């Protein structure tokens, strides 16, 4: 271990758990931007879940006689280059984008926690080896990594998820490791160690709960990052397979037609943008709410 | 301290080896053969393929190829490109790196300056409409994929209004649109960090003391606040620089800037192994060294952080 | 202590600033010289040298005509180099360095009289022996010529030379400086065509020996333009050759600018940063409706077939001709091309594109007939698509493939997904016959012959037969067509073979693409023959 963070505020006494979460929720509910964002995201999830019921048209079925139509009473957001209803595609796209975002971030969080905890708690050799793996992933040019992965695997939702998960976990691992480092020297952990509590238990019962809030914040912001990364893959033509609508895919396809029919790219851009902003507001709100230091 | 330096150096070398090995294996395993890609839609005589594979040592097993590669690389020879037949890798990568450094340093500098201004203003005017406005502006920046933003900028500013050139990198004017596209995301990220660390700092005892001494707010902010608020920014900048260096291929493609990002992606698409590996080494090294320097700087700047032996 | 730290901080901030300004300064340094060049270029439009800026999507791998691998690089070869024959704008075989020629009665011995006024760019005269030496070089497998020596394989002694069993290509003889005699092993009606393909054009041997054998450095040719510079990933610059044997070109300078993104290239054209640009189908409608831009639009026929291939070895149902026919009936080529591709292509009625001598105008192709398609599927045992395994169509151009997939799903009740593999994967998988069951691809001619499609794409056992179609009757017809020296007679066999492949639905021919360019007003003489733009020798700019 090379750098140690002596952070005086970290040694404050922790409140009992139930109160912490209740407090956090109360604080969060006072943050208007975060509440609005949470409601927006909740609605988005509902739309995604019930897309088949809500969507006015099939997102796959083209109508060659109604290509690149402007918004109308029939098609509220118009149609795309194959005459598919853009609103329906956006709804189904929410499914794919959210699914990818949540799955990837969940996977990344699990790997990140495991690696970060082990490295931070054990230090020494384990730390050095694990953190070199993190370094390599960090240092490896991310676009090269993505192109490699996608060319090694079949292009599919699964390989996109795998690629982005592999690219995302080092962030979580670093975060967790830092937190674990500063937590493990606290007195109650020392005490637990002295009375012979197994390391496994200490990590799970005592360290993990105490570093949960930064992980939750990272999780929220991370989903936004993943959705954006999927969009970048779509631009390279190595994202999720075309008939399946994703917002990124719709924007990058719409870009081709941007001069002729700008609405193809603009609507998905708006919805993607709003989602990004919502995740960020929510993440900021959570940070304020969960971090007892930040009493504003 | 010396030991620490040495250790970090070893780590950097180790990580570089790891990264190149990863790139090497991946590029050899990936389906797609460079010669076939160049030929595209034409038939190819088997003798041509054989001669070609022999020339570049592609007929040897992968681990052997890798060892040869490392041996040559240590002697400063990154090999010759497959695509630019016979051209040394460095002749292709060198100019590309310079181009990227040029325009991206402007973008990063712009992002840092704007972020500092936005962040400080919103921290000082916390919870006013100015704060909200500044932070919303900042957020809009991370809300769009850069290829969408780039397209909007080109169509709006270059074509509709005809203020700026569309693409290329010949004059300073050419840099404006890509720099904006590049800077918007980091600005958003950084300004929020500046804001929260400024808020943090302003509540510290020494700030309160300074204020009670009757110093003018602006002086307090500049003298005491800024330095401390800069620390977290520094950490992020380190990571950002690395990400930006390698991640700007989209901006470079759309604005047609012949930088390392575009060259790297082209190389992958053409399966130009030597260029891919060279780009991996350069970009990984840039990232590792930047973070190292930032760590050192951080240790110097933050009294709470010590480099332990 | 604190003061010390403050000092360090200020110092490092200053350092950072310094580095950044240094970078910014070094940026403005070439910028300072570049604008000068820029203004020169724009001033040029009124008086000074005339420049054409033309986009290419990536760097070519080489500028030596025999080593050029990419389709677009063949175009640069046309500007830089010259050969014995060439194709004019109407795709007529035209003597180029050859003044006139004789063929022996048995069609085996060709005697070429070369022009005596042709100079290499290094000043030396082009002599007959240059071709002998050049062809020997391309026959050497170690050189890695793009053609693999194929165009010379009919020359006496070629095989022995390629195998390293002979020191010279005995069938080629430089009688004197301007007389070249070539002896073939047997009569070959396509031999002269081979000599018009840029891959048989040669470079002076001294340029090869002096320079790098791979030859990226300073290309020397005999063409209308001379090499000036090549900045990888930026541009390739050529300038007019005052000593060109057909007269100095009207254009002073060509800049082949590397622009990987089509949309960017188009935007650059509209902003006046490029002079000529290919038009992507997505923008065709807007451009043809635009009062100004529509005036700058030009179309040329191209010998390229876009088709969907059905890989029989990978997907069992494709072995059934009825399934293949059903697929052909289920696709509305006309509507897709009209509504989605904005008529950028022409619906395919056969496999061989128009303007190829063996083109058969009487073929009608498969009409759009969903009912017929459903009947055929039912006959084949898949009523309403039941029991038909899910299918993926691999493509690099998703728009068209998505339209095709949607129609197949909609009309036949089967599941078709579109997969857009990374380019390397796509091409590798096609040649390996083992990755893509169903694919949408294009096939472009380098000579005016039906063999390009009928032989290369469908002949049993051939590597480029990505569909692994193998029909003995068809193969026999192709063999006959290829071995017949009488062109009229062989045309009959080709057309018979094509008709058979159509009836048997060997593939799904979709469209014949065209070249569509935007050309700035004031530029005249730009054009394309079937194989691509013909180069800038005849182009002028006011």
Image (cartoon, coloured by chain):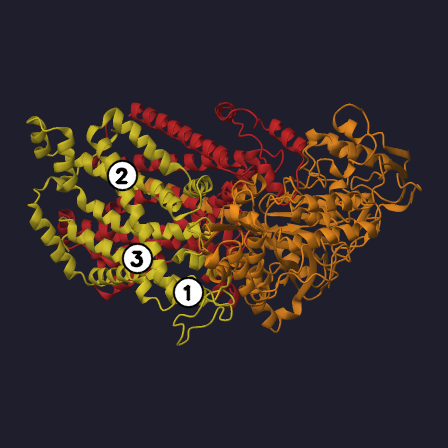
Chain colours: A yellow, B red, C orange
Who is closer to the viewer here, B106 or C481?
A: C481
Judged from the image, the secondary structure of the residue bearing numbered disc 3 is: helix
Which residue sits at x=85%, y=44%? C118
Disc on res. B251? none
A243 over C196 or under it: above or below: below
Q: Position of residue A271 (x, y in %)?
A: 35, 62
Can you identify the residue that label 2 sits on? A112
- How would you rate the neighbour count of disc 3 (Cα within 10 Å): few for under 14, some for 14-19, many for 20 or more? many
x, y percent for residue A250: 43, 59
Residue C141 placement (x, y as % from top left): 70, 30
Q: Secondary structure beneath disc 1? A: helix
Question: Which dot, 3 or 2, sits closer to the camera?
Answer: 2
Q: Alpha carbon of mark 1 to alpha carbon of mark 3: how far?
A: 27 Å
Q: Chain of mark 1?
A: A
Identity of the residue furthest to the bottom in this view: A73
- Mark 1 touching mark 3, by CB under 8 A? no
Q: Nearer the viewer, mark 1 or mark 3?
A: 1
Q: Is residue C42 visible?
A: no
* Residue under the image location 82 percent in, 29 percent down: C157
Q: Are marks 3 and 2 in contact (CB under 8 Å)?
A: no
- Of residues B243 and C176, the one nearer the viewer is C176
Residue A52 place in picture, x, y as percent: 33, 63
Q: Separation of disc 1 and disc 2 at Cα?
A: 35 Å
Label 3 chain ID: B
Frontmost residue, A206 versus B180: A206
Q: Label 1, on which residue?
A: A266
Q: Are marks 3 and 2 on the same chain?
A: no
User: Which residue lies at the image location 75% right of the left edge and 32% below the top edge?
Assistant: C139
Q: Which residue is mark 3?
A: B118
């Amino acid at each position: 271990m090379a750098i140690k963070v002596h952070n005086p505020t970290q040694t404050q006494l922790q409140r009992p758990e139930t109160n912490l979460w209740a407090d956090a929720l109360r604080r969060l509910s006072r943050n208007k931007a975060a509440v609005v964002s949470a409601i927006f995201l909740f609605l988005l999830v509902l739309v995604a879940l019930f897309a088949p019921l809500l969507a006015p048209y099939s997102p796959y079925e083209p109508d060659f006689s109604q290509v690149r139509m402007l918004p109308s009473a029939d098609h509220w957001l118009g149609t795309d280059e194959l005459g598919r209803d853009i609103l329906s595609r956006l709804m189904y796209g929410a499914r794919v984008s959210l699914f990818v975002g949540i799955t990837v971030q969940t996977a990344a969080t699990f790997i990140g926690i495991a690696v970060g905890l082990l490295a931070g708690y054990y230090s020494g050799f384990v730390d050095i080896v694990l953190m070199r793996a993190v370094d390599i992933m960090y240092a490896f040019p991310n676009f090269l990594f993505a192109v490699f992965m996608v060319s090694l695997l079949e292009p599919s939702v699964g390989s996109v998820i795998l690629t982005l998960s592999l690219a995302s976990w080092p962030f979580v691992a670093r975060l967790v490791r830092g937190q674990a480092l500063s937590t493990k020297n606290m007195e109650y952990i020392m005490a637990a160690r002295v009375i012979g509590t197994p390391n496994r238990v200490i990590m799970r019962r005592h360290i993990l709960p105490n570093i949960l809030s930064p992980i939750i914040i990272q999780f929220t912001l991370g989903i936004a990052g993943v959705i954006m990364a999927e969009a970048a893959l779509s631009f390279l033509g190595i994202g999720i397979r075309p008939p399946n609508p994703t917002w990124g895919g719709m924007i990058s396809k719409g870009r081709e037609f941007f001069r002729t029919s700008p609405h193809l790219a603009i609507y998905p851009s708006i919805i993607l943008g709003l989602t990004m902003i919502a995740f960020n507001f929510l993440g900021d709100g959570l940070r304020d709410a969960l971090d007892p230091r930040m009493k504003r | 301290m010396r030991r620490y330096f040495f250790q970090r150096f070893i780590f950097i070398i180790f990580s570089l080896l790891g990264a190149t090995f990863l790139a090497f294996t991946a590029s050899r395993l990936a389906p797609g053969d460079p010669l076939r890609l160049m030929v595209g839609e034409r038939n190819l005589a088997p003798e041509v393929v054989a001669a070609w594979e022999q020339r570049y040592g592609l007929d040897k097993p992968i681990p052997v190829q890798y060892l040869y590669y490392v041996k040559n690389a240590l002697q400063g020879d990154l090999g010759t490109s497959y695509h630019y037949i016979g051209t040394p890798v460095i002749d292709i990568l060198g100019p590309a790196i310079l181009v990227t450094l040029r325009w991206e340093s402007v973008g990063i500098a712009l992002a840092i300056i704007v972020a500092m201004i936005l962040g400080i203003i919103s921290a000082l005017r916390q919870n006013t409409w100015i704060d909200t406005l500044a932070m919303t502006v900042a957020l809009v920046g991370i809300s769009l994929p850069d290829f969408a933003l780039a397209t909007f900028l080109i169509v709006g500013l270059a074509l509709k209004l005809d203020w700026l050139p569309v693409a290329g990198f010949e004059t300073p004017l050419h840099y404006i649109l890509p720099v904006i596209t590049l800077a918007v995301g980091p600005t958003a990220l950084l300004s929020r960090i500046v804001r929260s660390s400024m808020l943090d700092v302003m509540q510290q005892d020494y700030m309160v003391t300074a204020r009670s001494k009757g110093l003018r707010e602006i002086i307090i902010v500049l003298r005491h606040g800024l330095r401390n608020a800069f620390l977290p920014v520094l950490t992020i900048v380190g990571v950002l620089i690395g990400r930006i260096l390698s991640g700007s291929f989209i901006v470079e493609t759309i604005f047609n800037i012949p930088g390392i990002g575009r060259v790297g992606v082209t190389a992958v698409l053409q399966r130009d192994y030597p260029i891919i590996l060279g780009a991996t080494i350069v970009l990984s090294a840039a990232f590792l060294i930047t973070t190292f320097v930032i760590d050192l700087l951080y240790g110097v700047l933050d009294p709470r952080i010590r480099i332990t032996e | 202590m604190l003061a010390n730290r403050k000092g360090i901080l200020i110092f490092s901030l200053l350092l950072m600033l310094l580095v950044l300004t240094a970078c910014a300064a070094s940026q403005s340094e070439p910028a300072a010289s570049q604008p000068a060049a820029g203004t020169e270029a724009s001033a040029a439009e009124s008086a000074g040298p005339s420049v054409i800026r033309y986009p290419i999507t990536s760097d070519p791998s080489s500028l030596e005509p025999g080593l050029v691998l990419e389709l677009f690089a063949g175009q640069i070869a046309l500007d830089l180099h010259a050969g014995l024959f060439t194709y004019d704008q109407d795709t007529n075989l035209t003597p180029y360095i050859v003044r006139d020629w004789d063929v022996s009665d048995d069609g085996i011995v060709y005697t070429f009289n070369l022009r005596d006024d042709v100079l290499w760019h290094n000043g030396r005269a082009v002599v007959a022996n240059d071709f002998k030496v050049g062809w020997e070089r391309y026959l050497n497998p170690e050189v890695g010529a793009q053609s693999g020596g194929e165009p010379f394989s009919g020359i006496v002694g070629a095989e022995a030379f390629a195998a390293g069993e002979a020191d010279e290509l005995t069938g080629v003889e430089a009688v004197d400086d301007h007389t070249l005699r070539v002896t073939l092993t047997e009569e070959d009606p396509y031999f002269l065509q081979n000599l018009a393909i840029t891959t048989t054009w040669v470079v002076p041997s001294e340029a090869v020996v002096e320079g790098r054998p791979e030859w990226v450095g300073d290309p020397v040719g005999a063409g209308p333009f001379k090499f000036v510079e090549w900045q990888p990933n930026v541009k390739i610059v050529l300038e007019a050759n005052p000593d060109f044997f057909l007269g100095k070109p009207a254009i002073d300078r060509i800049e082949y600018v590397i622009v990987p993104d089509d949309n960017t290239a188009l935007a650059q054209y509209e902003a006046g940063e490029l002079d000529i640009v290919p038009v992507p189908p997505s923008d065709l409608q807007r451009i043809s409706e635009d009062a100004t831009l529509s005036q700058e639009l030009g179309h040329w026929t191209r010998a390229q077939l876009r088709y969907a291939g059905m890989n029989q070895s990978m997907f069992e149902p494709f072995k059934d001709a009825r399934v293949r026919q059903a697929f052909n009936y289920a696709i509305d080529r006309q509507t897709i091309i009209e509504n989605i591709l904005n008529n950028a292509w022409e619906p395919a009625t056969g496999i061989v594109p128009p303007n190829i001598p063996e083109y058969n105008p009487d073929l009608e192709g498969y009409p759009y007939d969903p009912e017929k398609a459903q009947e055929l599927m039912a006959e084949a045992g898949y009523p309403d698509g039941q029991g038909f395994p899910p299918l993926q169509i691999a493509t690099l151009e998703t728009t068209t493939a998505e339209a095709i997939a949607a129609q197949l799903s909609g009309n036949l009740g089967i599941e078709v997904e579109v997969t857009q593999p990374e380019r390397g994967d796509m091409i590798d998988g096609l040649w390996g016959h083992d990755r893509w069951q169903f694919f949408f691809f294009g096939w472009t001619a380098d000579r005016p012959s039906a063999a390009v499609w009928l032989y290369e794409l469908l002949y049993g056992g051939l590597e480029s037969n990505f569909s692994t179609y193998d029909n003995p009757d068809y193969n026999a017809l192709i063999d006959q067509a290829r071995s017949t020296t009488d062109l009229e007679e062989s045309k009959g066999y080709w057309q018979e073979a094509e008709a058979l492949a159509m009836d048997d639905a060997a593939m799904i021919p979709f469209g014949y693409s065209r070249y569509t360019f935007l050309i700035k007003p004031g530029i005249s003489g730009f054009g394309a023959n079937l194989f691509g733009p013909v180069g800038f020798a005849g182009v002028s700019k006011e």
